[in-house]
Every structure is written in structure tokens, then in C-alpha cells.
Amino acid sequence: MVISVPRLVIAAPSSGSGKTTVATGLMAAFASRGLAVSPHKVGPDYIDPGYHALATGRVGRNLDAYLCGTELIAPLFAHGARGCDLAVVEGVMGLYDGAAGEGELASTAQVAKLLRAPVVLVVDASSQSRSVAALVHGFASWDPEVRVSGVILNKVGSSRHEEMLREALDESGVPVLGCLRRAAQVDTPARHLGLVPVAERRSDAVDAVGAMAEQVRRGCDLDALYALARGAGELSGAAWDAAAAVVSSPPPPLPVPSLGAAAPRPPHRPERPRPQTPDGLRVVAVAGGAAFTFSYAEHAELLTAAGAEVVTFDPLRDEQLPDGTRGLVIGGGFPEVYAPELSANEPLRKAVAELAFGGAPVAAECAGLLYLSRELDGQPMCGVLDVSARMSERLTLGYRDAVAVSDSVLAVAGTRMRGHEFHRTVVEPGAGAAPAWGVRAPERRVEGFVQQGVHASYLHTHWASQPGVARRFVERCRTS
């Protein structure tokens, strides 16, 4: 199979240069021309893909060479870009920045090479003139395998400033494909973990994406950018397929009655009868809404391929789990922002606790861990785990190389997975009697909780790297 989707990688010398504004604006501008645009984001970020989806009307997808492995980058890209006229890939941090201590691994540069895609460098020109040429020359010449094929100048102050920048870049040999003036209306609000997700400000986000598109239309040569995208090299190989991945994954070992240390069930929480579903249907409820916005699209696709019916619910609004729920997935997000509202929804908190104490499989990552705790910043949560969670001044951030310490509904002990941590909260204690993961760096430690059918941890993982996770989870839904 030959993959020939026109594509561009939007990169920058550093974070804060305007990659998200330019990439999202380009996606929306090309989509408004009637093109089917496939949006992608390098790295583990969950928030930018939400804006990408708003701009294109398609699911935003991540390309993370650390979490998924370099061998899956092109297949995952082809899966997302199937049937599209153009793919726009937003980079992460600076062009050559990747996983700490791992060379180019997981960098935008590496992904661009794996995709054989031209790179457009977004440069914050607000405090420079002729020096911009030296900066662009350095980035373009650092790695000959990376094709820096154009520059978009951002935060340009005036017509005279633009003229000086263009004159300087004439000597660099890298064409200027766009020039954007300072525009406060395209700014998007941020807080302790980055941009505010689309789900929390949809109307304002629509306006912001529209403003980004208009700015890009006015300031960029869209015809030249599309021509550049069409010059991307062909890729060979098959697109990733969830069904094929699940079939080829190792079959899950037979489930055991109890995994890890079982917490005592409070006497006022009687075990709820297991829902009866026709024909063995396995409903997996996935938390969504404004408080739980972090998930990779491939997770739901893998669960579906493994035989589950995936149904989304909103813990802020829904007082009961979806009918027939046999398993629960609670991903990342911002429960700390919505702690009072989550706490006020007592019927759902009780339903989640009853499901978990009844032995049903529950997979919780980061925000999900907080929601299952006894309390979050003093607000009662589901009480599935006897831990207390609170906000912290310290940011915990980085890739993690992990190994499963305990048998769980996701993996057998000894399974290696790579993950990512990104939070400003702490839970006390940080690990249960049966921890979820052993983490090697930045310090050796165990973290997370395996309790009956619950697997709860701060670690975000990408199941495409281990599709057997979804197969094992759904199998446990069938037998629990």
C-alpha cells in the first residue's frame, strides 16, 4: 500500500511561537475551501487535538513515537488521514526537542522524517529583524534529513518590520510562506496545564478558531502551502486498523476472581445486581464532558473492535451510568476545576462505587484516579479508593518507562508500557497494597492502585502500543 496524502508539519524553534494558532488556522482555512483535512498532533497533548477537531470536523489524532513506537507513526497517520485531501501535523515544543535523554525520539523532527513530510517553521519575530535569517538557517541545516521548506513569520509588528524580515530571509534560501500580525483576538485562555479544552468553552472556541482561520487566510499563501504539501514523499505500508490490531494481540489469560487487594465494601453500599444485556453485549461507559476531556481516539476504536459497545457519559450531568454498563473507562481531564459539581452528583458517585465494588473492570487514568478517590480538595468523590487527592504547587510532567507490578484488568504483571504524566495534583498514599506500575525514571518508584477490577494510575498510556489491553479489558467485562 502506498500512502500519498499531501501533508505538512508545522513546527517552531520553541514553545510559545504560535504553532497551535498557525496549525489550527491552516486546518480551518483549508477546510473552508472544501478540502477534507486530517488533523494530527505530535506528542501526548490532549488539548490541541480538540481545537483541531473543531477546525476540521474530524477527530484530532496524536502521533507519539515514545508512547507508540516509531514503527506505528506512519500506520497511525495513514489511519487518521484515510480519504483526506490534506493532512496538517502540529509539532511539539521546539522542532528538535523530544523525550529527555533520548536524542531525537518523539521530536517533531523525527516524526517529520518518519512521514517524509516537509516542515514549515513558525517563527516568533516580535523581537528580531535580520537575526531571523540566522535562526532559520540553523534550524534548516541542523539535520539534512529534515526538510525545512518554508517559514511563517508570527507576531510581526508593522509593514516595515515585515519588509526587514523578508529581506533577511531572502539570503537564507527558505521561502516566506506567511506573515501574521499580532492579533489578540486569536488568543486562547490557559491555566495550570495549558489551554482550556474546547469542551469547556465551545462557543468561544468556535470564535477563536474562526479568528485563527481568518488571520491565516489573510497572511499566508495557501496555494503555495498546498503545493508544498503535495510534494511530500510517498510512504509504503498499511494503515493501522483497530480490528486487525486486536486480533493479532496475544489472547488475554483467563480472568481471576479478584485482582490485587480488595478494599472492604462499606455496609451502606449494597452490591448492585449485574446488568443483563442481550447476546452478551458488553457496554463500556467512557467518561466525557467538560471534566474528562483527555482520551485518545484509538482507545474507543480498540474497545469497539474487541467487542464492546462504547457509550459516553458526563459525570457532571448524568446521574446514572449508561444502561447495561459492564465496564468503565475514566480518562484524564480537569476534575480539580469541577470538584464541587462532581461531588454534588451523588447518585452517579454511588453508581460508580457500586459498579467498582461489584468487581466490574474500571480503568482510570490521572483525572479518573482523582474521581475514584475518597476526596478531592476536601470534596467527597466516589470513595472507591481510600486515598485523598489535592492540588499541588508542583508540576509533574514527563514520559515514563513503566512495568505492570500487579495482574490487573489491563495487563499481567511484567507487561512493559510507556506512559506520560502531566498533573498538578497529588494523592496520598501514592500507591496501594497492589501498585499499578513500577516506574524507572526520573526515580524508581511504584504508583497507582490495583483493587478488585480497578486499575487506577496517574500514567496516561496509548493502547495502540499494546492492543491486548483493550482485548483483556473487554474479556473481563464479559466475565465479571
Image (spheres, rainbow, N blue to C red):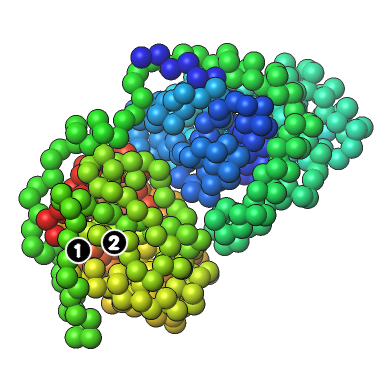
Separation (CA) of disc 2 from disc 1: 8 Å
- Name the residue: 63% across, 17% down: 228
- Name the residue: 22% across, 44% down: 307
Helix, strand, or loop for circle 1?
Answer: loop
Q: Which residue is mark 2?
A: 323
For this rendering, which residue is in front, 341 or 262? Answer: 341
Mark found first going from the N terminus, 2 or 1: 1
- Please identify the residue farthest to the front as the structure is shown: 278
Q: Position of residue 229 (x, y in %)?
A: 59, 19
- What type is the residue that disc 2 sits on? Asp
Asked if marks 2 and 1 touch (Cβ < 8 Å), the reply is yes
Helix, strand, or loop for circle 2?
Answer: loop
Q: Position of residue 9 (x, y in %)?
A: 57, 28
For this rendering, which residue is in front, 355 or 324? Answer: 324
Residues packed near mark 2 inside 10 Å, few (<14), some (14 to 19) or many (20 plus): few
- What type is the residue that disc 1 sits on? Pro
Residue 352 appears in view: yes
Is 315 drawn above or below residue 219 in the view shown? below
Is 385 drawn above or below residue 396 in the view shown? below
For this rendering, which residue is in front, 173 or 258? Answer: 258
